[in-house]
Amino acid sequence: MELKNGIYQYLYKRDKPMSLKIMGIIVALVSIGGLASSPILGIVLVLAAGGLLSYQSGIEVDFDERKYRLITAFGTQGFGEWQQLHELKCVSVFKTKLTSKTYGRSNASVTTTESVIQVNLATNQNKRIRLLETEKAEEAFAFAKEVSAKLNLRIWDASEKEGSWKD
């Protein structure tokens, strides 16, 4: 677990929707024409295109203060509002399949499925706060062990059909 100034940050690895990529490329192309006609408009459009193409979403957790925030990150700077970590039940390790569909111009679609293991904080209201997503079970359980030690919680292993508590 890598802490920066005492705060854990994880940027979700899943790719941005294709529509945002296309919008960013269109804005970038329009900005080229905008630079010739109005430099200020062109610069604004270049910045907008850069933002659409470079932003990432993720989470930051301050374990000492027991707060978290869902962030939108541009480079190293994350933006989001801090929230208190309410009563937590456990750290859960959960295996799931992520499915995404991409549509082409002819309305044909391509479906991709990826198997991942997520490490979540489970609240007493059955809300999950996703902290990590990986393909490696060893990495997920090592991370879950660190989080459980920091928050004094048990680990629920839901990576198999029958869930069980880990020591």
Image: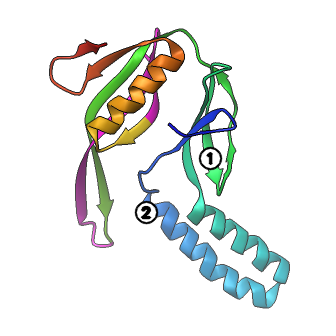
Looking at the image, is mark 1 or mark 2 earlier in the sequence? 2
The C terminus sits in image quarter: top left
Q: How is the image coloured?
A: rainbow
In this picture, residue 161 sits left or right of residue 9: left
**Res 38 seen here:** yes
Q: Residue at coordinates 46% horizontally, 8% vertically from top-left?
A: 124
In percent of width and height, residue 66 lies at 63, 19
Q: Residue at coordinates 65% horizontally, 62% vertically from top-left?
A: 51
Q: Which residue is mark 2?
A: 18
Callout 1: helix, strand or loop?
strand
Q: Residue at coordinates 43% horizontally, 56% vertically from top-left?
A: 15
Marker disc for residue 36: none
- Quarter occupied by residue 130: top left
In this picture, residue 121 sits left or right of residue 93: right
Residue 116 falls inside the magenta stretch: yes
- Quarter occupied by residue 36: bottom right
Q: Main SS of the magenta segment? A: strand
In percent of width and height, residue 59 lies at 56, 37
In this picture, residue 155 sits left or right of residue 27: left
Write the start and end of the magenta stretch as one range: 105-131
Q: Residue furthest bottom?
A: 36
Given this view, does label 1 or label 2 mark the residue nearer the observer?
1
Q: Work out whether residue 138 or residue 46 is closer to the camera in this orientation and state it.
A: 138
Q: Residue at coordinates 46% horizontally, 56% vertically from top-left?
A: 16
Residue 122 falls inside the magenta stretch: yes
Amino acid, disc 2: Met
Q: Work out whether residue 38 or residue 136 is closer to the camera in this orientation and state it.
A: 136
Callout 2: helix, strand or loop?
helix
Query: What whole-number distance in Å separates the C-alpha atoms at marks 1 and 2?
Result: 18 Å
Q: Which residue is mark 1?
A: 72
Give neighbour class at mark 2: few <14, some 14-19, many 20+ (Cα, 10 Å).
few
Total numbered labels? 2
